[in-house]
Image (tube, rainbow, N blue to C red):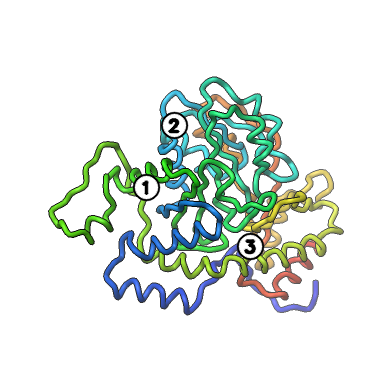
Amino acid sequence: MTDLARRTIAIALPSTGEEEWLALRESIETGWLSQGPKVKAFEDAFATRHQVAHALATTSCTTALHLALAAAGVGPGDEVIVPAFTWVATANVAVYCGATPVFVDVDPQTYNMDMAQVAQAVTPRTRAAIPVHLFGLCADMNGLRAALPENVVVIEDAACAAGATYRGRPAGGLGAMACFSFHPRKSITTGEGGMLTTDDADLAERANMLRNHGASISEEVRHRGPKPYLLPDFDVLGFNYRMTDLQGALGSVQLTKLDRFIAERDIWARWYLDALADIPWLQMPTIPEGYGHAWQSFVTVVVEKTAPAPRNDIMERLQALGISTRPGTHAVTELGYYKDLLGLQSGQFAVASRLERQSLALPLHNRMSEEDYVYIADALHGI
């Protein structure tokens, strides 16, 4: 270990400052706190940054994904292809619609959906597929599209991928729809919150209606219009998935920092790749040619056969040194609900199960210092 002071390093911390405080104050002073002009400004800026025609802010990425499936008409009897290694919400939203999630295993290098298995998962009931851009690395969208019939709707789970690119194109416009997260562990945050993006005007119109209870006109139009007695009609069953203007104001400020945040993370992610390359028991994340990684997380894999200790023991040792780590994410197929629902067996999706057991996310965020990174590298070398 280098002679550095003992420190405490969080796995993730949002990076906010005076601009965010001022943006919130402005919204509070106007009195417009529910979805309104600040949300619209955030949506417009997000759509421009991600080169899509439409962006609709929501309460979370989970509700955005549910909204996307509902807008696409996914319902009972349909199947939705999802990766086995992801946050549970990716599968849950299919169940919310009455559909059945159909799992495929993931690639051991990219941690994303194994496209070779997708074609085998397609049945006449397949209505949609949700590729996850896990940890900020886009899924192989060309490979996915080649594996699917044309009528299957592709919805990007871009929860971790604001600012990521795939062959020169931003995440968000690589499928029929995409959904982003602004949870505090993501590169930019609104506390909670999400965004649905699409280039399809019809899907955008339907999603916009569904997120506002199914109302025929928006709250902003109704309140600002000349006919105060006018109430919306409700011809479809909708949801209340609207973002607040407080969150929209915060999101607009955060979005102006997105490119800087990603550039900083990229510098330190590549520093990790170099500094930890000589640890034989630690597999580094992969960046395929033509991909722009957004680095929501830096996720390694502890190689059990050569590691000096099991992954969990290594995590405990790092925690004792003040370094917070986490498993990459779930093998959803190992969770009790889905084992019971679908009759899944432990280890049935071998790569996902191994990654849940061996993956190790290291701290990577925009409030870390050079000394923090050196401390972490020295701690790993010392194990």
Density class for disc 3 (Cα within 10 Å; few <14, some 14-19, many ≥20) is some
Q: Looking at the image, which residue is at 13% across and 53% down?
A: 229
Q: What is the CA distance from the residue labelled 2 to the residue labelled 3?
A: 39 Å
Q: Looking at the image, which residue is at 68% across and 59% down?
A: 362
Q: Which mark is residue 324?
A: 3
Mark yes or no: residue 353 visible: no
Left or right, 285 with respect to 122, comes to right
Residue kind at label 3, given as amino acid type: Ser
Q: Position of residue 152 (x, y in %)?
A: 54, 30
Residue kind at label 2, given as amino acid type: Val
Mark yes or no: residue 354 visible: yes
Density class for disc 1 (Cα within 10 Å; few <14, some 14-19, many ≥20) is many
Left or right, 230 with respect to 8, comes to left
Q: Looking at the image, which residue is at 64% across and 64% down?
A: 262
Q: What is the CA distance from the residue labelled 2 to the residue labelled 1?
A: 16 Å
**Is disc 2 placed on a helix, strand or loop?**
loop
Contact between labelled residues 3 and 2, with CB atoms less than 8 Å apart: no
Q: What residue is disc 1 on?
A: 208
Numbered marks: total: 3
Picture quarter with the N terminus: bottom right
Q: Is residue 167 above or below residue 147?
A: below
